[in-house]
Amino acid sequence: GYPEALADVEEAITDMTHIHERLMQTGLSAENAALLDQIELDGHAYLDGFREAFALQSERNAVFEEQLSPSGAAARQALTEVIENAHGGGDLDTALAAAEAQQTLLLARVHVEEYLLNNQATVRDEAFHEIALANEQMNGLLRGLSSPSQRALVAQAQESFAVYNDAFI
């Protein structure tokens, strides 16, 4: 995992520093000493970059665990309840519309997770497209509902998905 990789890099840079110190005591030429100094500086710069990347990955993981995952799941669950309620009441048009919104929401979540893993702009764009489409579908679903309980569930899904969207942006 990442903590182990960071520890490995820190250990390698510490080892490199000790080797640098020993080599500097061997009477190197000025040219070789300067080259060795540059290698050590580059190693420490690499470690600083690795630490920064580790911190950003940790931040990304925290946002995913604390915001994206729970809010996405809450939106999906609210739409599931609309589907079940509508289906149970024989309102198949509402059940279908909610299922389509849920499908798009799930696809958006897949694209978001894929983007967080690979940082490809095309995947990010697909995620934004699916997020916008899910929002449109939920807005359309809400406009077509007369049931107060179903309207409340869709509003709940929209609120949760807004949290999700804000965390992703």
Image: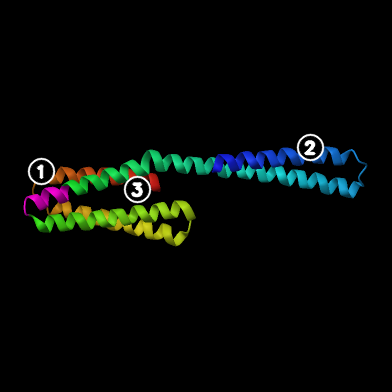
Q: Residues within 10 Å of mark 1 (few under 14, many from 20)?
A: few
Residue 161 position, x and y percent, is: 29, 46
Classify residue 27 by image quadrant.
Answer: top right
Task: Work out how far the residue at label 3 is from the one at label 2, CA to CA, in angstroms.
Answer: 48 Å
Question: Which residue is under mark 3?
Answer: 165
Left or right side of 121 for 139:
left
Of the residues shown, which amino acid type is indicated by label 1?
Pro
Total labels: the figure holds 3
Q: Is residue 77 above or below residue 144?
A: above
Decide which of tag 3 and tag 2 comes sooner along the chain. Answer: 2
Question: Which residue is under mark 1?
Answer: 148
What range of the chain is rendered magenta?
82-90
Q: Residue 96's mark? A: none
Q: Are marks 3 and 2 in contact (CB under 8 Å)?
A: no
Classify residue 148 by image quadrant.
Answer: top left
Of the residues shown, which amino acid type is indicated by label 2?
His
Q: Secondary structure at mark 1?
A: helix
Q: Residue 18's mark? A: 2
Decide which of tag 2 and tag 1 comes sooner along the chain. Answer: 2
Task: Work out how far the residue at label 1 is from the one at label 3, CA to CA, in angstroms.
Answer: 25 Å
Q: Nearer the viewer, residue 84 or 124?
A: 84
Q: Residues within 10 Å of mark 3 (few under 14, many from 20)?
A: many
